[in-house]
Amino acid sequence: MKNLIPSISIPNLPAGKMGVVLGSLIAGQWVFSDLVHVPSGGIAVMAAGAGLWFLSKPAVGSFVPPSTVKGWVKRCKDVLAQFESLEDPSDHLLKASSRSLELQEVLSRKTPQSLALISTIGVDLPEVGLFEESIVNSHSLDLVCSSTLPIKNKSWELPEKFFQKDLIIYYLPLPLRAVDLLWLKAIPEDLGSWIMVSSNDSVDWSNELNALNSQLPERWKNRILISEGSHSVQQMKNVLSPVRRCLEQSKRNIDQTRQRLLSRLHTSWQSDLEGLRREKFKAIQNRSQWLVAGAVFASPVPSTDLLSLAVVNGLMIQEMGNIWSCDIKPDLLNKVARQLAIAALAQGVVEWSGQTLLGVAKLHGGTWLAAGAMQAISAAYLTRVVGRSMADWMALNNGVSEPDLELLKLQAPELISRAAEKEKVDWANFLKQSKNWMNEQIEQKTNTPKPQLS
């Protein structure tokens, strides 16, 4: 198999120059198709081979969430600083004050350790007085017993008053219902929690327990509190012994709750921040695609196109790195961009756009058949798709300093596929922009005075 892939000599490219690979692949397709007459399928094989060559020494890494309150606070403050660099100054002051207050509210929680016994509407919970007396320990405790979870819901998100608890016990009536599975799924995995079940028939209980274990997700195995009709404090204490042991670690439980709340706050802010980033990126994307198109349209020589594309797309990736506050080394970003560009060409992004443009050309003969027009606009579209997939990848890898390039090999086709589908939705608008751009190029060429021969 190795002998089927031609030897390709590729220089060690400067950091951040996404366009070198992107441009070379675009130009390479034209050269091989027009001059050497290599079929497009062969080009895809060559591109795949080049991709393997590029990634022969992958750098492995992944984002590791903070494991302390201090670490999450640092992450949250980093996000606040990024808002300052992206938001309009007139809006930022008020929003920054609100966000700082949200952060302070989480950090200043001084409530005692909290536990909630919950279930759905209509379920009879164990006697509250018996439960309180059985769960008491050496630490102060805020206890809530509530069967208020709805049996019909749209979001299936755990209510805020329960999300903020340190520990949860979900009282589960048997047999297991679909609604209970949905609420159990809604309980965060980093929230200490148990399932409590009750059975008055000790003969059938083993069968019920086996059936229950076969239906529950793996996380709930060994987290089931079995109450066989307990009516005394001592019996209930025995049932609740795992919970009582956990309650003895008050400081750890409260600390984990703070981390969970900070994590959710961080996620919410990141979502808002991503919206701002996409707005900024859209302007860069629109500008870069037509700069690429202009470079291709102006020069019939592939090698000159390569230089133009390298400068333009290098700037695009550099600007994107600034928007996403990317900590990844420039040479690794370059490798990511290479892999995405190769995946885009392997999926036929240029071929699809070119064929679609040919269909439009039948309707707009003179303008759309101008020399180099379709090559230029196909290059613009490829820049658009690869740019969007790069933005998606940066969003997924926020906080990563050493990307997993082996994982990227698996992700790249999906990233490109999604980006291409999103761009196809806006194809009509892209064509409209393309026609305006082409009219400008034709007009410029028409109005450019020819040099006078002496």
Image (spheres, rainbow, N blue to C red):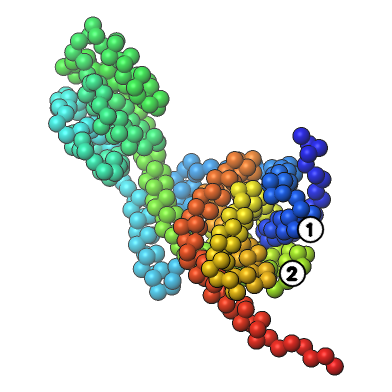
Q: Is residue 451 visible?
A: yes
**Residue found at x 41% / y 58%:** 272
Q: Which residue is depicted at the point 26% across and 11% down? A: 205
Q: Please give the label number shown on residue 402.
A: none
* Figure quadrant of the N terminus: top right
Q: Is mark 1 on a helix, strand or loop?
A: helix
Query: Going 32% across and 48% down the picture, which residue do you hit?
Result: 109
Does 424 sit above or below residue 130? below
Q: Mark 1 is on which residue type?
A: Leu
Instruction: Give residue 204's position: percent from left, percent from top.
Output: 24, 9
Residue lying at the far bottom in this picture: please name it.
Answer: 454
Q: Earlier in the sequence, mark 1 or mark 2?
A: 1
Give the Cα distance between marks 1 and 2: 13 Å
Residue 394 appears left or right of 201: right
Q: In this view, does 259 lie above or below 221?
A: below
Q: Which amino acid does label 2 sit on?
A: Pro
Residue at screen point 78% across, 58% down? 35
Residue occupied by mark 2: 300
Comparing 241 with 228, the one in front is 228
50 above or below 150? below
Picture coordinates of residue 89 (x, y %)?
Answer: 43, 73
Question: Between residues 83 and 68, which one lies in front from this camera angle?
Answer: 83
**SS class of the residue under badge 2?**
loop
Observer-nearest of 36 and 44: 36
Name the side, left or right, on which 14 lies relative to 211. Answer: right
Q: Mark 1 points at which residue?
A: 35
Q: Which of 237 and 149 is in front in this view?
A: 149
Residue lying furthest top: 203
Kindly indicate the quadrant of the structure image that contains residue 55: top right
